Amino acid sequence: VSTVRRQAATGDEEAAFQVGMMYEVGYDVKQNCSKAAEWVTKAAEAGYPPAQYNLGLRYKDGDGVTASTAEAEKWLNKAAAGKYRPARVALAKLLPQDR
């Protein structure tokens, strides 16, 4: 756990995502959705598609962040552009078909 945290603190986006998931489920830390969202955001901003997808879902549901369809769409589009297939499915569910 300390290795992952150290890697995350030095800019490793996959490690930052893992730390976010640790906070999400309360693995070796006190569960905290806001802290989870902070770490996931760092990974998403660094271009990690699974984190972009996760952040999009967080904005869709208001999980650790204020719900925002526009932000959800933005992050899901980034993940989809990174060829992260689940993001395409989530976008299809998020956006009206006549758009």
Image (cartoon, grey):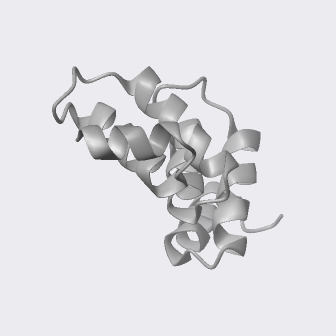
* Quadrant position of residue 22: top left
The vertical placement of 94 against 61, above or below, is below
Q: Is residue 6 visible?
A: yes
Q: On the rendered structure, is 56 left or right of 78?
A: left
Compared across the picture, whether 74 is left or right of 63 comes to right
User: Residue 90, percent across and down?
Assistant: 55, 63
Q: Is residue 34 left or right of residue 73?
A: left
Q: Is residue 13 left or right of residue 22?
A: right
Name the residue nearer the viewer: 53 or 60. Answer: 53
With respect to residue 49, does 36 lie above or below?
A: above
Q: Quadrant of the C terminus?
A: bottom right
Front residue of this view, candidates 38 and 72: 38
Name the residue at the left extreme.
28
Q: Residue at x 76, y 42 (%)?
A: 70
Residue in the foreground of this view, choosing between 97 and 63: 63
Q: Looking at the image, which is closer to me, 53 or 88? A: 53
User: How many numbered marks are there?
Assistant: 0
> At 59% across and 39% down in the image, what residue appears?
41
Q: Give percent across and percent down for residue 60.
A: 57, 41
Residue at image x 67%, y 73%?
82
**In the image, is residue 31 above or below residue 69?**
above
- Quadrant for the N terminus in the image: top left
Whether residue 60 can be seen here: no
Residue 77 falls in image quadrant = bottom right
Q: Position of residue 81 (x, y in %)?
A: 72, 73
Give the residue at x 66% y 71%. Answer: 80
